[in-house]
Image (cartoon, rainbow, N blue to C red):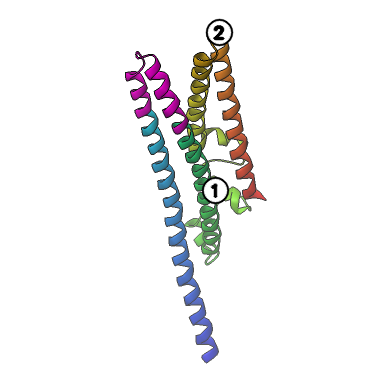
Amino acid sequence: MEVTMDEQGREQAFMSALVTQHFDLRSAASATISESSSRASLYLFSLSSALVALGFTAQRGEAFTIFAAAVLPAIFLLGLFTFVRVCDTAIENVNALRSIVRIRRFYSSLTPEAGRYFDVGSRADDTEAAMDVMATNRSWVGVLFTTGTMIAALNSMVAGVGVTLLLNATVRPTSLFISVGTGGGVAVVLVIAAIFYQWRRFLTLFA
């Protein structure tokens, strides 16, 4: 009898711990989304404020150049830090959802009818099942629609504009076409690098 009660106590403790873990993971997943949104909003607010300030100094010649040289690098660094951290939170979110999928699989096996209420999809892999929860898949195309890519695209434009202004201000013989082309090339390279970085990070989830 003591053995039976001891086993029952362990099962109850395990279920209690599992429910607590499920709640903690759900809170952690929500926290990653909240942090990602907050960081993206901070970057967008800083960028829009900088653009407004640049607009006020656009007609002041040298003052505009000096102000742009001070503000654009700062915005670019903020965007770079935001991009990296947003990628980190995305990975944390998938990890949390993957653990939740494992718990839901256990819930669905408790009784024959439990699978109706704890559907984890048809994918055997926990990471792919977590991707299903996020309405995405393993394809690299999904990387194009992340918050990180949005930040990277805007930040790459900031870098491109900065390079264009730098060439236009320091290399006088350079034509506007060459300056804009160089700045555009820098922006494209940075966007591609950001997409590749995210893709490599997400691949670690399947390792």
Question: Is 53 placed left or right of 141 in the picture?
Answer: left
Q: Main secondary structure of the magenta part?
A: helix
Q: Is residue 63 magenta?
A: yes
- Residue 155: where, in percent of width, then height? 49, 30
Residue 122 in view in this figure:
no
Which amino acid type is shown beneath numbered disc 2?
Answer: Ser
The residue wearing badge 1 is 91
Q: Establish if 34 lies above or below 147.
A: below
Q: Residues within 10 Å of mark 1 (few under 14, many from 20)?
A: some
Q: Establish if 144 lies above or below 114.
A: above
Q: Establish if 85 lies above or below 170.
A: below
The residue wearing badge 2 is 175
Residue 143 in view in this figure:
yes
Question: Is 116 placed left or right of 66 in the picture?
Answer: right
Extreme residue toward the bottom, this view: 1
Between 178 and 138, the one lying in front of the other is: 178
Residue at (38% x, 38% y) in the render: 42
Q: Is residue 158 magenta?
A: no
Which amino acid type is shown beneath numbered disc 1?
Answer: Ile
